[in-house]
Each structure stands twice: as C-alpha cells, then as structure tokens.
Image (cartoon, helix red, strand yellow):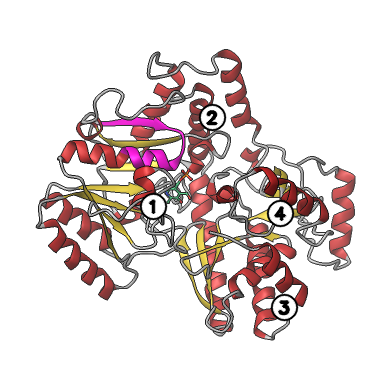
C-alpha cells in the first residue's frame, strides 16, 4: 500500500466508526499474530470506482496492451496491498476477495516471502535448471512431494504458469499411456497454452486457433447425483475404446462458477480410470494451496490422483511458478527436454514458493480458511433463503466460494451485484459460463471481522437488488467497464 496507515489515521477511523460513518469498518489487526505487524486499515472508498486515475490508466493501457491480455472486471487499476486489503490508483482501499485470482493466498506485504525471493535473487537469480540444478528448486520439489496426496514415489516438474504445467501433465499422460485422448469437462478452464487451452471448455477460447480435435473429448461436469451417474456411464463407455489416456479435472470447477461435484464422483471416477489403466489428473491451480481448508481440494474426496497440478497460490503471488507432481514412473515417461523452460526451477521463485508452504504449514492457515469459509458460506446461504429472487445459490468449500445471482431477468445482474460490492469496499470478482457467479476467494488470512464485512456487504447489495435500488450510475459503470472472463 503506497500510504501506510498511521496510528493516528487509524484512530480517527475508529472514531468515524463509533459515530456510524458509512461502511468504513475498522479492522482489528489480524487475529493471528503470526501475520506480523500489519497496519490496521479499513475499507475506504472515497472516489467512486473506477476513479479518474484508473480510467486514465485504462486508456493508456488500451494503446499498448493487446486486448486479449485484459478481461478486466471494473476498470480499476490496483496499486498496492497490505494484509487482506488492496488499494487502487485513486486511493480507495478495498477488502480483497479476489486475491489476484487466488494467487495472493497470504495477502499483501508479506515480508518473509518477499525477503526469501530477494535474498535468493541477489545470490543466484537463475541457474537455467535444464543445464545446472539449484538447491531452491530441489527443496521446493521435496516439499511438494511431501504435501501432495499419496505416499508412493513421486517426481515434480516445475513450470512458469498453471497453463504450461497442465500441458506437461497431458504430455506425461500421453507418453506414459501411449494414448492421446483426454476426457475434459464442459466449462473447465485449464489455461492458455496449446494443450491446456484445448483441454479447456470455456466458451470461445479455442475459436479460430485450434481445430476441433478427437483427442479432447468433452463430458458434462456433474453437480447432482443424477448427473454424476449419467456422466460416469458416459465415461465408462468412452474408456472401453482403449484410446483414452486419462481425465483432466478441476476438483471444484473455478472459472465455471465454483461448481462443486456431488459426493462420490471423484472416488468412483478414479476407480474406473484405474481399471482401464487411464490416468487421473487433477488441476488444483485455483483450488489448491490451502484454499479449501486442506492443501488440495481433492483431499476432501479421499482420492489420490496420478498427477496433481499447482500454480497461482504456490508462490503466494510473489512469483510466476507452477508445478506438476505425479507418480515417478509417469513423470519420467517424458524424455529429457520434452518439458522444460529456461526459467524452470527459477531459484528466487522456488524459494518464495517454499516459504509460502512453510508459512501455511506453521501458522494454521488452512484451519483459518476452513473455519472462516464455513462461517461465510453459512451466512451467504442464509441470505439466499432471504432473497431467493436475487440469489440462486451460495456454494463452495473453505474460502473458495461462489454466490450465484439470478440473471434470468437481467443478464447484467451479477456484474451489477459485484460492482456494487466493490463500490462498498469489498473487492469480489465474477465469473461462470454466463458470468452469473460472484467470486469470493479472499486471501486465506482473513479475520472474523473481515468475514462478517463480506457477508454484511453482500446482504446490503442483495437487499438493494431485491428492492430495485441499485443506482443507475452503477449500471452505467457496468456498461462501460465490465468485461470479465
Ligand atoms: C483451474 C485453473 N487451471 C489452470 C489455470 C491457468 O493458470 P495460469 O493462468 O497460471 O496459466 C487457471 C487460471 O485461471 C485455473 O483457474
């Protein structure tokens, strides 16, 4: 955060709260002492977002950045962060409920991680792992083999982003099984590189880039028991062809709008795959690193995947790094140089990731995500019962929560809801195959007070929407600035 909040400023905000001023809720320092001495800050939206500086930056950006790089949500340019708060160029302070698309699992200003990166960078900024190993990458791989499900022999391939590690997982699957075909799920998102993009079922992502391929077979992602049985029947039939190398799945679909599979789906699927010597690849890029209250969301299903892919929160947002962790014999089916990069195992990034893993382990971060996630989901589900005309469903696990908005009367309703939350200082996102789901994925260091604030703001907005009191200015902003995935 460019302006660190002084004690004096903080006290004046406390006074503001005491007199009932606006929505500015003063946050107590994070309950967990391990977070260190973060300044106490409060949400404060004094310039209606996107403010003039953000808008000017948007214009500047559009001149030089290709449009495919930017699927912005609100036209806001972020500038800094501290604890669970982010600031924008116009000086607004939001409670972050997006975590830069789940990368910033420990929030902002985490000196320990930044220092691990910095110290390594000053010592050895790169070794080009394909030519010369480095200790940081090896230590990270050792940690990853320890914290992923299963006690069998595992190996790790380190990459640069979730997309390329999904590519690597499919490459390993193909080499190991000798089969090219992958079963993927409708509305899945696995990335923006060759194989990961083809494995994604998200709207027009592949249009005009990849011709339809018989090697990527789409099945529906089930959310009910009836759908579960139908999908499993379909997969069983597909497997009998003997051409399927494996299934690539998100344990909870993220960008599709937090779609949670029904009980038993993954255990039954894994059993079926193993019978046909096909592999189970799980994409934990969004759901992993403690977000659902366990290291990996698939742990809730008690299933051990053949390959697990992680990225995003792996480095807490401090470095672009990803990894796939799999059965040793599957990973080593790839010959030397079939999956590597100049920046593979980049020492500072690996050191940052290793530090994030230690912090999550040492300070009960997953327990916090579990506890506060349950509390938040409970409040949102109660809200849904109160406003069924506005809210379709609140769902998720831990701090991976989606609030589905009724868009049947107004296709922009979800964007309006989200924009209104942002105007009130809670920086949520929105996604889903019809952009119908408010995305609530805060840093895992959230406090109880912050959790209540998220629920309180959602309640205010639901009430406004229910009574037709969303301001015309918010609608105008949605028209001008909302894009989204
Ligand atoms: C589930 C999932 N898989 C893969 C990716 C792609 O990761 P990256 O953007 O780091 O390449 C994402 C990113 O949104 C994701 O959510």
Q: How far apart are marks 1 and 3 (CA)?
A: 36 Å
Label located before the other in sequence (2 or 3): 2
Q: How far apart are marks 1 and 4 (CA)?
A: 31 Å
Q: Closer to the observer: label 1 or label 3? A: 3
Left or right for 72, reference 183: right
Label located before the other in sequence (1 or 4): 4
Label located before the other in sequence (1 or 3): 1
Q: Is residue 167 magenta?
A: yes
Identify residue for label 3.
470
Residue 166 vertical position relative to residue 201 in the rendered view, above or below: above
Residue at x-position 58% and y-position 77%:
383
Q: Distance between the residues labelled 1 and 2?
A: 22 Å
Whether the residue under disc 2 has CB within 8 Å of ligand 1 = no
| Callout 2: SS | helix
Q: Do the residues labelled 1 and 2 touch (CB within 8 Å)?
A: no
| Callout 3: SS | loop
| Residue 422 in which image quadrant | bottom right
Residue at x-position 86% and y-position 44%:
7
Q: How far apart are marks 4 and 2 (CA)?
A: 28 Å
Identify residue for label 4.
76
Q: Closer to the observer: label 1 or label 4? A: 4
The magenta stretch is: 154-168
| Residue 50 in which image quadrant | bottom right
Left or right for 42, reference 30: right
Identify residue for label 2.
352
The location of residue 427, given as percent across then percent down, is 66, 58
The location of residue 4, given as percent across then percent down, is 81, 40
Q: Is residue 417 magenta?
A: no
Identify residue for label 1.
297
Residue 400 vertical position relative to residue 233 in the rendered view, above or below: above
| Residue 23 in which image quadrant | bottom right
């Amino acid at each position: 955060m460019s302006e660190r909040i002084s004690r004096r400023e903080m006290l004046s905000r406390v006074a503001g709260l005491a007199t009932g001023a606006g929505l500015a809720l003063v946050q107590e320092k994070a309950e967990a002492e391990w977070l260190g001495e973060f300044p106490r800050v409060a949400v404060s939206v004094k310039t209606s977002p996107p403010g003039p500086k953000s808008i000017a930056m948007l214009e500047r950006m559009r001149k030089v950045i290709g449009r495919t790089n930017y699927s912005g949500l609100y036209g806001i340019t972020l500038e800094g962060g501290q604890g669970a708060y982010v600031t924008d160029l116009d000086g607004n302070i939001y409670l972050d409920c997006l975590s830069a698309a789940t990368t910033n699992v420990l929030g902002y200003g985490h000196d320990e991680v930044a220092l691990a990166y910095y110290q390594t960078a000053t010592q050895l900024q790169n070794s080009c792992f394909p030519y010369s190993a480095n200790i940081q990458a090896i230590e990270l791989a050792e940690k990853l083999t320890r914290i992923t499900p299963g006690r069998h022999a595992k190996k790790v391939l380190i990459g640069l982003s979730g997309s390329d590690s999904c590519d690597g997982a499919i490459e390993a699957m193909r080499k190991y099984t000798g089969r090219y075909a992958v079963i993927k799920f409708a509305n899945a998102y696995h990335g923006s590189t060759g194989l990961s993009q083809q494995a994604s079922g998200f709207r027009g992502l592949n249009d005009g880039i990849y011709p339809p391929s018989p090697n990527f077979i789409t099945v529906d992602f089930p959310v009910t028991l009836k759908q579960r049985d139908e999908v499993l029947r379909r997969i069983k039939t597909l497997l009998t062809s003997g051409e399927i190398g494996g299934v690539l799945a998100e344990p909870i679909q993220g960008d599709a709008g937090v779609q949670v599979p029904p009980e038993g789906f993954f255990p039954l699927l894994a059993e079926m795959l193993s019978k046909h010597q096909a592999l189970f690849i799980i994409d934990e890029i969004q759901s992993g690193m403690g977000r659902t209250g366990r290291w990996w969301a698939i742990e809730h299903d008690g299933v051990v995947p053949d390959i697990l892919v992680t990225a995003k929160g792996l480095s807490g947002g401090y470095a672009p790094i990803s990894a796939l962790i799999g059965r040793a014999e599957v990973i080593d089916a790839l010959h030397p140089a079939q999956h590597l990069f100049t920046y593979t195992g980049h020492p500072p990034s690996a050191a940052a990731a290793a530090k994030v893993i230690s912090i999550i382990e040492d300070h009960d971060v997953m327990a916090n995500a579990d506890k506060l996630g349950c509390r938040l989901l409970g409040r949102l589900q109660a809200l849904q019962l109160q406003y069924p005309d506005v809210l379709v469903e609140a769902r998720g696990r831990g701090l991976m929560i989606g609030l589905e908005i009724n868009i049947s009367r107004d296709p922009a309703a979800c964007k309006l809801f989200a924009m209104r939350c942002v105007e009130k200082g809670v920086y949520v996102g929105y996604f889903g195959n019809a952009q119908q789901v408010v995305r609530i994925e805060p840093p895992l260091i959230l406090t109880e007070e912050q959790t209540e604030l998220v629920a309180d703001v959602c309640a205010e907005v639901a009430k406004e929407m229910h009574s037709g009191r969303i301001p015309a200015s918010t609608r105008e902003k949605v028209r001008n600035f909302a894009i989204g995935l």
